[in-house]
Image (spheres, rainbow, N blue to C red):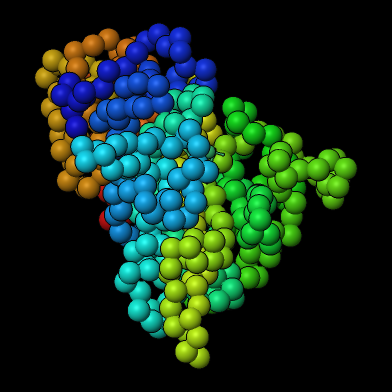
Amino acid sequence: MRRSRLFLPTLRETPAEAQIVSHRLMLRAGMVRQASAGIYSWLPLGLRVLKRVEQIVREEQDASGAQEILMPTIQSADLWRKSGRYEDYGKEMLRIRDRHDRDLLYGPTNEELITDILASDLSSYRDLPLNLYHIQWKFRDEVRPRFGVMRGREFLMKDNYSFDLDFAAARHSYNKMFVAYLRTFKRMGLKAIPMRADTGPIGGDLSHEFVVLADTGESAVFCDKALLEMDVPGAELDYDADLQPVIDKWTAYYAATDDMHVADKCPVGEDQLVTARGIEVGHIFYFGTKYSEPLGAVVQGPDGKRVALEMGSYGIGVSRLAGAIIEASHDDKGIIWPESVAPYLIGLVNLKSGDRDCDTAGDDLYGFIQRAGLSVLYDDRNERAGGKFADMELIGLPWRITIGPRGLKNGKVELQPRAGGATDELSLDEIRNWITAKAGG
Ligand code: ATP
Ligand code: MG
C-alpha cells in the first residue's frame, strides 16, 4: 500500500479523552474513531490488526477441532426467558422491540441461541463431542465504557460452546480450550496467564481467566513468578491425547485475580509472588447442564437413557486484544507490533520523493516486497524525513527500510527493527536477500 493513498489520519497531539496508552496510540495511529460512547469505527490500519488477531484466534480454534459458525447479533427474547436470563441480565442487555411488538435483544453472549440449535438438531450422542464457535460483535451496555476498545459497549468476541455426554468428556473439551488459548495468546506475542476464576453455583475448578499483565489492567492479580517462564505447547501437540498433565503443570502454580485472592491463604512466598495488574483477554468456563436442561438440549445416550448435554463456554475478547497487545508492546514513540499481528510487516520510507534515483529504488523495492508476498506500507509522500520517521514509529511496523540519496550513492539502504536493535546498512542485493528469506523462500 502506498502511504499517499492510505486513509491513515494520524494525530500529532495526544487526544485528551484517552486515559491509557493503548487508547491514545490507537487514536493517534488512526486505527479507530469513536462513534459514540464505547462504540468504535475501525479505520484501515486498525481493521488490518483486528483481522489478523481474529485470524490467529480462528486458526487455533480450528486446530483444536472446533468448528466455525456464525450466529446473528440480534436474538429473540423468548429463548432468554426460557433460561431465566432475560430478567437476570439486567441493564447491560440492550433490549429492542420490532414493528410487531416482539421483544428482541442485541446479544451480549450466545449460550441460549447455540443451545437451542443443538436442542433442535442434535439427534444422537454419536455426534458428540461437539465444539462450535463464532466470531461476532456483542453489545453490553457497560456502566463505564472506557479505555477505548478495551472496555467497549460494542465489541468483537470469539465465543464457543462445547457439548459432551459426560463430565470426563466435558473436562477434555475444557482442557483443549485451555491449551488452545495458551497457544493463541503466545502467537500474538502475549504472556497470558490462566488464573483461577469464580465458578459460582456450578462449583469445581473449571473456570479460568486468561490475564495479560499490564500496569493499566483493570484488576489486581497475583501469581507465582514461575508462570511467567512456562513453556506453551507447540503445534505438534495432539489434541486427542490426554491433556490433563499439561493443565496440571500450569495449574500447579498459584494464580488468582483479586476476587479469588486471599492474602492470608496465599501459598506463595513474598519473593516468589508477582503482584501486578491484569487485562482479562479470555475466559473459559464449564457449567454442566445449566442451559441444556431448561432449553431441552438432550440426547439419548448409549444406554437408551436421555441425558442433558454437558456444556462449557469459552470467550476471547478479539477487539480488546488489539488494545491489550499495544499495552504490552509500545515505547514513548508509539506502538511496537509483533510480526504476527502487525498491519504491515515492513514500512518502506523514501526519504526524498521526487528524486529520480530514490523513486526508482523505492518503487523497485516496493514491487519486490509485494511479489515476495510480504505486506508493505510505502511512504512515498513528499514530506520531511522527520515527519515520516515519526509516523512510522507511531504506527509501529516491525521493520523499516529507508532509502535516501546519500546511502543510494553507495548502493545502500537502511534496515531497522522497530523493537530496537542496530540499524543495518545493506546493499540492494542484500536487502533483496533479506526480503526473500523473510518470505520464507
Ligand atoms: P469483564 O470482567 O472484563 O467485564 P466478562 O467476565 O464480562 O469480562 P466474558 O463474558 O467472559 O467477560 O467475555 C469474554 C471476553 O470478552 C472477556 O474475557 C474479554 O476479553 C472480552 N470482553 C468482555 N467484556 C468486554 C467489553 N466490554 N469490551 C471489550 N471486550 C470485552
Ligand atoms: Mg463484563
Q: Which quarter of the figure is the C terminus placed in?
A: bottom left
Residue sitting nearer the eye, 250 or 371? 250
Residue at the extreme bottom of the image, as rendered: 303
For residue 295, say whether it is visible.
Answer: yes
Residue sitting nearer the eye, 157 or 409? 157
Residue beneath the point at 32% across and 17% down: 10
Residue sitting nearer the eye, 350 or 330? 330
Q: Position of residue 106 (x, y in %)?
A: 35, 40
Residue beneath the point at 62% across and 36% down: 278
Quarter holding residue 242:
bottom right
- Taking the image as shown, residue 305 lies to the left or right of residue 360, namely right
- Taking the image as shown, residue 214 lies to the left or right of residue 354, namely right
Give the vertical position of 89 relative to 347 (above or below).
below
- Taking the image as shown, residue 19 lies to the left or right of residue 100, namely right
Residue beneath the point at 29% across and 49% down: 72
Q: Position of residue 389 (x, y in %)?
A: 35, 18
Q: Position of residue 362 (x, y in %)?
A: 19, 28
Quarter holding residue 220:
top right
Residue beneath the point at 42% across and 11% down: 15
For residue 416, say whether it is visible.
Answer: no
Residue at the extreme front of the image, as rendered: 101
Q: Which quarter of the figure is the N terminus placed in?
A: top left
Give the vertical position of 146 relative to 63 (above or below).
above
Q: How many marks?
A: 0
- Taking the image as shown, residue 185 lies to the left or right of residue 276, namely left
Q: Position of residue 385 (x, y in %)?
A: 30, 13
